[in-house]
């Protein structure tokens, strides 16, 4: 019984481990540019030349509160104005970060599509890494949601103005 509890605790701790979604760009010896989200996928000779394209903060599981928080006192008008100003700055910062994230994803998609384009690459001498193609598919699926989130943030910013 005690052993099961220890195993369960260990599993819960593993579930709450940090996860990252950093995107790295690197060029191999033939001049082909690759994108990856895992540094271990980059050959050791090219690892020093890798640059970070997108950096996202680690995501961790939020613990559930066991006791509901006490009700907050009614905010005064001065507090509401200060809170609105801070909220506006935070929303503007989130919107800028999301715009940069969308631009980086669109740039990668355009880059891979240009490599696949017969008009721009008639000889088909450039090879596209399968990992890059998978990343493009993932980004194409994420972009509509990212754009919707950006629209929501911008509309909330407009309401605060």
Image (cartoon, helix red, strand yellow):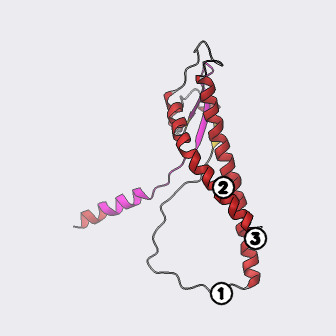
Horizontal side of residue 45 vs 98, given as left or right: left
Image quadrant containing the N terminus: bottom left
Pointer 3 local density, CA inside 10 Å: few below 14, some 14–19, many at least 20: some
Whichever of callouts 2 and 1 sits on the residue coming sooner in the sequence is 1
Residue drawn at x 70%, y 58% as measured from the top left: 154
The residue to which callout 1 is attached is 74
Give the Cα distance between marks 2 and 1: 31 Å
Give the Cα distance between marks 3 and 1: 18 Å
Whichever of callouts 3 and 2 sits on the residue coming sooner in the sequence is 3
Q: Secondary structure at mark 1?
A: loop
Give the Cα distance between marks 3 and 2: 20 Å
Q: Secondary structure at mark 2?
A: helix
Is 84 drawn above or below residue 96 in the view shown?
below
Q: Kindly indicate the quadrant of the structure image that contains residue 39.
A: top right
Report if residue 34 lies within the magenta region.
yes
Q: Kindly indicate the quadrant of the structure image that contains residue 95.
A: bottom right
Residue positioned most to the left: 1
Horizontal side of residue 5 vs 153, given as left or right: left
Horizontal side of residue 95 vs 13, given as left or right: right
Q: Position of residue 94 (x, y in %)?
A: 67, 57
Residue numbers of the magenta segment: 7-35
The circle on residue 151 is: 2
Q: Could you tell me if residue 18 is visible in this image?
A: yes
The residue to which callout 3 is attached is 85
Q: Could you tell me if residue 50 is visible in this image?
A: no
Residue drawn at x 70%, y 68% as measured from the top left: 87
Image quadrant containing the C terminus: bottom right
Q: Position of residue 124 (x, y in %)?
A: 57, 15
């Amino acid at each position: 019984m005690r052993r099961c509890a220890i195993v369960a605790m260990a599993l819960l701790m593993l579930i709450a481990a940090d996860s990252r979604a950093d995107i790295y760009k690197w060029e191999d010896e033939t001049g082909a540019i690759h994108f990856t989200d895992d540094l271990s996928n980059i050959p050791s000779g090219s690892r020093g030349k890798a640059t970070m394209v997108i950096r996202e903060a680690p995501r961790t599981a939020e613990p559930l509160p066991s006791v509901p928080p006490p009700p907050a006192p009614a905010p005064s008008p001065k507090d509401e104005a200060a809170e609105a100003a801070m909220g506006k700055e935070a929303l503007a910062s989130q919107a800028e970060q999301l715009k940069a994230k969308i631009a980086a994803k669109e740039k990668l998609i355009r880059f891979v599509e240009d490599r696949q384009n017969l008009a721009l690459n008639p000889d088909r001498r450039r090879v596209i890494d399968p990992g890059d193609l998978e990343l493009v598919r993932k980004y194409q699926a994420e972009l509509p949601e990212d754009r919707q989130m950006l629209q929501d943030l911008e509309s909330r910013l407009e309401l605060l103005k």
